[in-house]
Amino acid sequence: MLASSPENLRADLRTTGLTAYSSGFSEASILAAVMALLACALTFRYVRFADTAPVRHAPGAPIPCKTID
């Protein structure tokens, strides 16, 4: 598409395209970081430790095998 544009506009169009691509990529990265921070904050707010505490087995109880035989 750049090759079909007039010769005197190619450098300006290329610079504009690269600037738009890089600023769009940085904005998408910042948005993803904000969403991850929000998800982290909501997790700490709404998930209680009691809901995710590890299950305690009785002493001497056999440990079930979790691998596929």
Image (cartoon, rainbow, N blue to C red):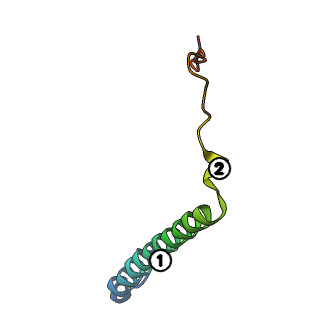
Residue sitting at x 64%, y 56%:
48
Residue sitting at x 58%, y 18%:
63
Residue sitting at x 59%, y 14%:
62
- Picture coordinates of residue 31 (x, y %)? 52, 74
Residue 40 relative to residue 6: left or right? right
Three-letter residue code for mark 2: Ala
Q: CA distance from mark 1 to mark 2?
A: 38 Å
Q: Tell me: residue 15, above or below residue 63.
A: below
Q: Quadrant of residue 26?
A: bottom left
- Picture coordinates of residue 15 (x, y %)? 35, 82
Mark 2 residue crowding within 10 angstroms, few (<14) / some (14–19) / many (20+): few
Three-letter residue code for mark 1: Glu
Mark 1 residue crowding within 10 angstroms, few (<14) / some (14–19) / many (20+): few
Q: Quadrant of residue 67?
A: top right
Q: Nearer the viewer, residue 31 or 18?
A: 31
Q: Which residue matches tag 2?
A: 50
Residue sitting at x 34%, y 89%:
8
State which quarter of the image contains the C terminus. Answer: top right
Q: Residue furthest front?
A: 59
Q: Quadrant of residue 40?
A: bottom right
Quick one: SS at disc 1? Answer: helix
- Picture coordinates of residue 58 (x, y %)? 61, 23
Between disc 1 and disc 2, the foreground one is: 2
Q: Which residue matches tag 1?
A: 27
Q: Nearer the viewer, residue 66 or 16?
A: 66
